[in-house]
Every structure is written in C-alpha cells, then in structure tokens.
Image (tube, rainbow, N blue to C red):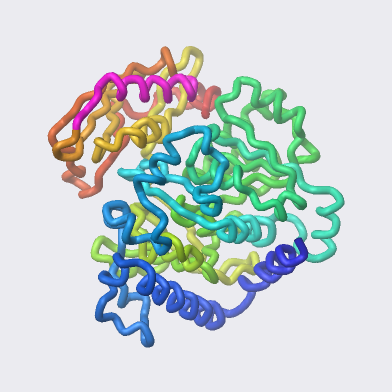
Amino acid sequence: MLAFSVRALALAVVPKLGPRFVQSLQQKRLKSLVRLAVERSPHFRKKYQGIELSRLSLTDLPPSNKAELMANFDSVVTDRRLKRAGIEQFIDNPENEGLRYLGQYIISHTSGSQGQPMLVVQQPRHLELLFSFQMTRGNLGKVGPAEAIRRLRQPERMAAILLGKDFFPTASTFQNMPVQAQRYVKLRRFAQTDPRLVDALNEYRPTIITAYASVLESLALEAQAGRLKLEPELRQLVSNSEVLTDRARARIEGTFGIRVLNNYATGECTFLTTGCRQGRGAHVNADWVILEVVDEKYQPVPNGTPGRKVLITNLANTVLPFIRYEIGDVATMGVENCGCGNRFPRVEHIAGRDADAFWINDGPGYRRVISIVFSHAFEFLREVREWQAIQTERNRVEVRLELIPGASYDPERTRHLIHRELSEHGYQGLLEVEVKVVPRLLPDPKTGKFQRMISRVGLPDDPARVAAAIG
C-alpha cells in the first residue's frame, strides 16, 4: 500500500518536468521494450531484423497494425504460453469474467468498431499505472500526502457506468481495479441500460462518475428534470470511449457545475491520456506512451493539423508489444502550451468516431444507437472479416457482412447474436435489422476511408426531441 502511494504521488510530478527529461525517459524505455521484444517475440525478431538497437530511433521501426498482430498473435506475444486459441476460448466463457488468464494476465478485447477486434493481454501493473494516473493527473481535487491520508479515512465513491459485464477494456479495467487503489476509491459498477439507473445513483450518491459522453449527457437531462439529485457530493465527471461534443460538454458542465475530464484512450493502451483540468482536450501520459499523429504515409503532421491516423507505442506492455501501433482515429494535437501545469503533449481534438451512431425514433423522442451494439455481436463471429451497418430508414438497418474466404456461415447464429445485443441495450422491438452477406466491402471512394456506420436518413429534424431522449 505504501509503495503504491509513493509511486502514484511520484507520477504526479513528472508532467511538470521539462520535455528533455521526458524524451530521455521515453528513449530509455523504448530501447528496453524493443530489446525485450526482439529477444522473446519471434515475430518482432524477424520484423526488426537489421535494425541497430544500440542507436535506435523511433522512426527506424516500421508501424504495426491490428491485422498483423492478430494474424501472428502466437509469435507476437513474449510469453510462449499465451496462445490465441486458448485466449479466445477463455473469453468465450462468461464465467471467466473478472478472472485472470493463467492466473496472472488480464484479458480484454477491443470493440471491433474499427474492424476485427484486437485481443489485449495486460499485467496487473498496467492497471496500477492507469489508476495512479487517474488519481493524480486526472483529478480535479487536491493531490499530495495530506489528501492521500484524508482519502484513506474517507474514500471517494466512484460510479462506473458501463455497458455491462464483459471482456471489453473498460469493464475489464474496473473488474480488476488494484486493491491498493480501492483503499482510496470505493467503486460500484452500474449498467447504463438499467431502467433503475437514476434511482440507484440517487441512493449511492457518488462523488465521481465515469461513463460514456452520451450517458453523462443523459444524466444531465435527468438532473435538469429534477429526477437525478447528486449535489453537493458529486465532485468529478470523467468522459470516456465516445467523442465529447462541445454541445454535450456545455450541457453537462452547465447542469452539474463541474468540469468534465475528457479521456482519450484505446483498449490497447487504456492509460493513453488523462483529461485536461482546464477542459482543453487530454494530455498524453508521455512518460509511458508515445503518440504520433501522422498522415496516410505515416509522416508526422504539424500540431494543430488533423492527421489521418495515430500511432501508439505502449512503453509498459512487454507481454503483447504495441509498438507504433496504428489506430484509425483522426486526431489534432494542441499548438499552445496548456495553463493547467501539465507540460505533456495535448490532444486537442479527436474526430472519426462522431459518425459511429444512428438516431432512431422512440415514441416521444429519439434514441442514439452506437456502433458497439453491432460490433459486439460480430466479435463472436470469427468468420466475419468486415461489417457495415446502413440505416436505410429511421428504424431500419441493413447489416452487410464480408466473410473470411472459405469460412462457413451460420445465419441463424448471426440473427441470434444481433437480437441478443438489441435486447441487452433496450432496442428490441424498436429497430428492424436485415443481414446480408456480400462479396466485398469497400472504402468510401470519395474519402478513401471505410465507414462501418452509414446513415441514409441523417440526423432527426427536431433537435428538441433529440435532447429529450438522448442516450
């Protein structure tokens, strides 16, 4: 407990140090990570053959991506006991949720909103880093020994509002919250689809809420209507996993009178950033992560200019190395120094996820359907190479599937999984879904980007009805 506390408080100091110190730290950890990958991973040993490790520069390393790592998973991991087939079998059993694979590894998988899901293998120390960052760098309150002692006596009450139990990174993270962190923060998980969510929050009276941006906005509407009453205990709001629009931020902060900390992260690196205390994007945790914003040819773009993709190097994960790992997010880095005191690079804006939703008619208002409703179903269909959902009418969606060559296809299982997800998220009876298998799914010829969520009906005409039923 003492060691965890000292390490966490030390992490609070690093963002205030100069860029030279951080770059030196990055280089040291990068060399250590690459050496270990070459020694223990047959895939990276071959990939980096001929690269002089003693004079290593980040750009010497060719980028990697999800398809590459998944296709070569067994030779990518540095623990030879880890096998893709065994891990997939492990996560297919719901009874394993919250358990550690081989007694030591925390397993999760990405949502597949950008194609095939990625299996993620972590060690407990990775989550220790994450919660240490959130408790120090991602904290609107005081940080220091005196505050730590006070929180040991009177822990914060955190409400984590999730899609439900599963092997998604967010759910897995909170299921495996370090016991040391739980001395400072009492955690309770809530399902965002629970019809009693508002009543449950009123009863629990959290001091911290972490949830999707759309859920936080929905809670703001409940508070405006007088149904959610959390003041004055509520002191911090954390948005994750979805784009936080300016409209949503204004509504949430205006309702609760609290700054929203907007985190940008991925399943492959859950501690990628912490939200800026001044609301100016999110600061990269650059002592343990390297984030590159690049164009379509993997060349860096200037700060203030949107890139076409990002490359992430997770300097902590030595079991499943993510080195210059490609993510299809459109990010813009901040130009100006931030006045919050954090000198780490700042992600000013994230785009590319805003379109991953449909608005459907739900009686008196509209409801938002996010891509995870579909992608979660297709995670269990490994014969599917790619999927696309097209909203052809307000409450009708055509799902197109491209299969892996030579794979068999079970249409009945596909329908079952889709209807299970619709029911789980409260859309059963509202949304009609038709599934078609197509030979090939292609990118948009105008942009060159592949879209998994395409609406042919657009946004609703009546913004008031949207605001009345958002979420």
Where does the magenta region start and end? 408-426
Confirm whether the magenta stretch covers residue 421.
Answer: yes
**Quadrant in which the N terminus is drawn:** bottom right
- Horizontal side of 306 relative to 466 (left or right) equals left
Residue closer to the observer: 78 or 297: 78
Give the quarter of the image for residue 468: top right
Please provide percent x and percent y for residue 153.
86, 51
Residue closer to the observer: 268 or 122: 122
- Horizontal side of 279 relative to 112 (left or right) equals right
Seen at 49% across and 53% down, the residue is: 265
Please provide percent x and percent y for residue 5.
74, 64
Seen at 36% across and 36% down, the residue is: 379
Residue 308 visible in the displayed image: no
Whether 191 is drawn above or below 120: the answer is: above
- Dominant SS in magenta: helix
Give the quarter of the image for residue 399: top left
Whether 312 is drawn above or below 374: the answer is: below
Please provide percent x and percent y for residue 357.
39, 33
Seen at 63% across and 32% down, the residue is: 190
